[in-house]
Image: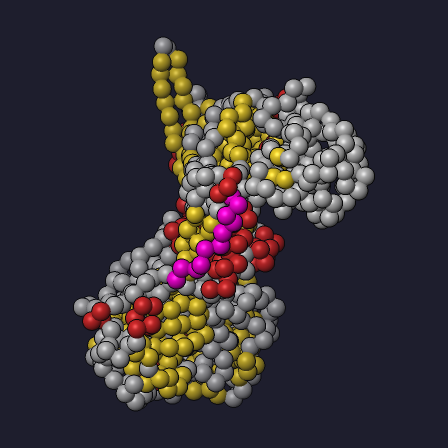
Amino acid sequence: MATDRVFLVEMEGWNPTTSAVETLYWTDGGGLQTEEGDDPSDEFYEPYLVVPPGRLYKRSLFADGRTGGGTQVEIADGIAIANTGGQWDHLAEWGWDGRPFRLYKLDAGQARGDAVLLLSGVVEQLLPVYEAKAGEVDSRLVIRLKDPLSRFDQPLQPYKYLGTNVGPDGFEGTEEDLKGQPRPIGYGVCREVPARPVNTSLLVYQVADGAVAEISSVYDKGVMLTLDTDYATPALLAAATPAPGEYATCLAYGLFMLGATPAGAITADISTVGSPLPSGNAVELDGAGGNYHRAGAVSGAAATDRGLASLWFRVDDGDGFARTLVSLRDANFQHAFALYLNSANKLVGEWLNAAGGSNGNVISTATYPAGGGWHHLVLAWIFGPVPYIALRVDGGNQTNAGVDANGLFAPLGTGCRIGAQGAVLPSQPFPGALAEVWIGWGQFLDITVSAGVERFRTLSGYPADLGPTGARPTGTSATIYLRGGPDVFGSNLGTGGDFVREDTAALATSTPYAPPPASPSLVTAAEIIRDIARARAGVTEDEIDGPAFDQAMLDAPEPIGLWVGEERTVREVLDEVANSAALAYWWRSDGKLTLARFRAPTGPPVATIQMSDTLSLARQPVTDTGNGLPAYSVVVEHSPIYQVQDGGALADSVDTARRAYLATEFRRAAPTADNSVRVRHLLAPELTWQTRISEPSAADAFAADRLAVYSRRRARWLDRVPLTDAMAAIEPFDVVELRDDRPSPRFGLGGGKLFRVLGIDPAWRDRTIEFDLWGGVAELRGDDPIQGWAFPVGRVGGLRGAGFVGWSFAIGRVGNITGSPIVGWTFPAGTVQPADLLTTEAGDPLVTEAGDNLIVEE
């Protein structure tokens, strides 16, 4: 049991001595021993944690004082471990970067299971510090935490065009036009996107890095062309012959071909299918005779000492028997390559000689029995002076042994097979499913580091996009790249020639691909943010606050269209998408990525902050446009085009209306206004909101929604209070009540007001926490429902209207009502009825400053 309030730290690190990840436990108390059955069970928290620093980091929904824009995290101090005797020096050699860190608070009398999680984060680095002052030594290890949002500080599109086209071959552009440029990414409906010329010899262009639902229009110098037809593969598109004035598409790869040399800039209107992660089918083999056979030699594969292979597999049957996944051989059966499951259900990669002996092999540590679902393997080898064989399955390392230091291998013989043996291997056909079979001869990646594996398998555990010819992992097209269902699986997208289906093969009942988005067009901001976080930043489904994302889809239903063709970071794009729908996104203290539509605070609150508990309270300015003054109007810019054109860039046949459309990046909706705001606030601003909303009607609805939030005066307070369990549990975006419970309340808080939490800044050493609060409506308007409002001082003797005398409003405060001097008066009991017109005793209606009658509403 704890004897005093203490902090607990749990952090994971990689121990180089044991080659394993271990968890260390620290406390700032006198040490803490957990009980059997606690979590963790029977562990000792070492008493070397230096009293936590003033701050670890401050979390804010937006930049200081704002209620929109990008999420902010401010890293401050680190956590220190006392190391005066040098007993922890060895920890400086451990691997800490990217490892989990958890900070808890435990009060007196509580068991470990009662500890409150204050922060779940990630370690950036551990730094030894040694200082000698006045004869005393201060030696400690400082744990620096990583900004959790830094996961998004990486390129949105890491894949660039290779510039490797030779004449009509390839879809990578050339060194002169596309080499090194990022491939375009699209979400939702995007208009007038500048198409990328991926093959100028064939007049083939690309509008998105992956499949699109539709390329609805293509324009040459502003003139619309006519759609011919769609082709299933890039190879079929390359052989197409659309007529002049027409275009043909390959929607599966975001490509289209022109029927004639263009006269000017080529743009297109597109609609994406959503996720940039690949999708598709897999092939299911029966384990009897179903396989894919290459009758001749694998084309273009010279003898080499190295290679690289990746595939996804699902084992359905055959435990206790050897089963072949891949079998390739040379003309003499020498140095034949086989990848199979042995009778112990272990994966084996083996290079065989004519007699069936092994020149080199790698055997998995783990087993893969039938019924275990989908797995991914990646295998790399070099048979040279410094031999290398590495196998990783599902991202984990495996064992290798028996390397031939000087072997050469080329799959030049006949009888190469996928899913059955084709060489001197005593094995049965494979009973299960296969997807994304990729093999590259003479290619190499170091897969002992995660970056190598991630070329084939995303951080979320799904197949990565390997490109239309499998060139994306290494920059060179694959020798063998097979994907899809049974009818197309044998059509090799690589350079080595097609495989022929033998016997039976069926469409697989499941695939390893990422699940499809909730809606087929992926148009809402919440869906796009979820998809980018998962596909581009490696956020897993377990790290996503699913209910919050689902709710945000309902609260922010505006269709969003986003096309990115330049270098941008994930965070920049997430901020832009979130702002387009007034969403805030942030990492919760428990490590979940969440988001919500930013709205005015409504009850019930998660906690009440009393003035009697407040250590400091300071009114702060709101730094939005207009410095927080109520806005009388909101203008939404929407439906952007991605290539502005005017003047001579357009053909003479382009009419005036289309010229005007193409000359402006954004459409501008008619203002949504409430001019009564300007009666009360002479400096009320008009807010302009630039968005990626793709439909005008949705932009109008969004403007009305934002005006309802920003046409009211809101207050912003910084409130610092003691760090209690209730205060520690408050998260950004939560709603709290701020109430002055003292005998003489101030600042209009006597009746309590609701505030949205914009930011949280805990000071662990002082055991206090500061909240950045926004809300607290400061005025009552004639169209407001007024049930629940209170007048905190005085009493009205005779208001009329449905027996109104002596009735009360329980929560809130009215700032100024004219027509009778009732500011500050109270009604001690009861409720009013809907549709009551409030009047004075003389029968005069009560009105607001703007002159509106006060009518009680539902």
Question: Where's residue 179, x and y in %?
Answer: 23, 65
Residue 671 in sight here = yes
Provide the residue span drawn in magenta: 667-677
Q: Name the side, left or right, on which 310 lies relative to 594.
A: left
User: Residue pushed farthest front?
Assistant: 842
Q: Position of residue 27 (x, y in %)?
A: 56, 27
- Relative to 303, does residue 487 appear above or below in the rendering? below
Residue 612 in which image quadrant: top right
- Regarding residue 171, the answer to whether it shows in the image is no
Drawn side of residue 781 relative to residue 458, left or right: right
Q: Is residue 396 left or right of residue 185?
A: right
Query: Where is residue 257 shown, x and y percent of the image?
Result: 31, 81
For residue 763: magenta? no
**Total label count?**
0
Q: Nearer the viewer, residue 358 or 504?
A: 504
Task: Identify the residue at horizontal 34%, vertical 68% (top origin).
Answer: 661
Determine whether 591 is above or below 48 in the image. Answer: below
Residue located 35% across and 16% down the image:
132
The residue closer to the viewer here, 419 or 790, is: 790
Residue 668 drawn in magenta: yes
How far across and down, in percent of the image, does residue 775 sit? 56, 38
Asked if 693 appears above or below 718 in the picture, the reply is: below
Furthest-left residue in this view: 176
* Left or right placement of residue 664 versus residue 327 in this view: left
| Residue at horizontal 52 percent and vertical 88 percent from the top | 503
Q: Residue at x 80, y 42 (%)?
A: 802
